[in-house]
Amino acid sequence: VALAATPEYKFTHYTSTNSGLPYNMVNKIIQDEKGFIWFGTSSGLSRFDGTRFRNYTKEELGLQSVYVTALCNDEDGNLWVGTDLGVTVYNVHTDRFEPFTRKSDSGTFIHNKANAICKGPDGVIWISVNGQGLFAYDPTSKSLRNYFFEHGKQTLPVNIRTLHVDAENGLWISLFYHSLLYLAPGQAIPQSLREWTVISQFRHDDVTAVQT
C-alpha cells in the first residue's frame, strides 16, 4: 500500500527587524473571527493581516504596559488582552481598546499580571491574575466575581499559571510548580483547594498549558 506523501511546509521567518513585529519574544498567538492573527509579545501587541503587521501602543491599549501575557476571543468577537499591568478589550465594533476596569463582587479591580484568559462554553471569561486569584466575568449580567481572594490577600499558596474551561464547563487550573486541579461542571467554586480534584500525576509539576 502506497503511503500518502508527506506535505512540504515552507516557513517564513518573521523577526522584529524584517517584518515590523514589535519584539522577537512572542508569548501568545490567536486568530479572530475576521481572520486576523494577533501576536502578544513582551514589548507590544501586533495584528497581522496576511501581508503586514500593525503594532499598538500603550496609549491605544489604554494601559501602562505593552507586555502582553494572554489573549482570548469572546462571544462577540472582541479580543481580551492580558498584560503585566491589567487587562484591556479590543472592541471589534468601535475598532478601539477599552481598559477593563470593572469592580468585582469583592470590591477589587484587575491591576496585576494576567497569566491566562479563557472563555467557557457559556461565554463567561475567566482571568487568572498574579496576587489576586481568579476572576470570572459574565457578559450577560456584566458582573465580575473574584475567587481565592479574601481580606486583601490571595488565598492560593502560589499563583495560577494557566487555566481552561472544557466543553462540559469543567474548570482546569494549574498552579506554578504545585498541582493540576479540576472542578467538575456545576460545582460552586470553593475557596479551599482541598475540595478540588488534584490530578496526582501532575503534583508539583509546572503545567504550562491545559487543553481537553
Image (cartoon, helix red, strand yellow):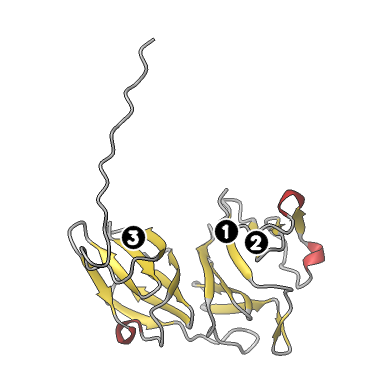
Q: CA distance from mark 2 to mark 3?
A: 26 Å
Circle 1 — which element?
Answer: loop
Q: CA distance from mark 1 to mark 2?
A: 8 Å
State the residue at coordinates (33%, 64%).
38
In the rendered view of the protein, which quadrant contains the N terminus? top left
Amino acid type of the residue tagged 2 in the rendering: Ser
Say above or below: 173 vs 151: above
Residue 48, quarter of the rendered image: bottom left
- Mark nearest the camera among 3 and 1 is 1
Q: Which residue is mark 2?
A: 174
State the residue at coordinates (57%, 58%).
208
Residue 79, percent across and down? Answer: 38, 69
Q: Which residue is mark 1?
A: 208
Find the residue positioned furthest to the right.
194
State the residue at coordinates (74%, 56%).
203
Say above or below: 149 vs 7: below
Residue 163, percent across and down? Answer: 59, 62
Say above or below: 118 vs 61: above
State the residue at coordinates (31%, 23%).
5
Q: Label 1: how many residues lie within 10 Å, few (<14), some (14-19) or many (20+)?
A: few
- Mark nearest the camera among 1 and 2 is 1
- Mark nearest the camera among 2 and 3 is 2
Q: Label 2: how many residues lie within 10 Å, few (<14), some (14-19) or many (20+)?
A: many
Amino acid type of the residue tagged 1 in the rendering: Thr
Q: Which residue is mark 3?
A: 32
Circle 3 — which element?
Answer: loop
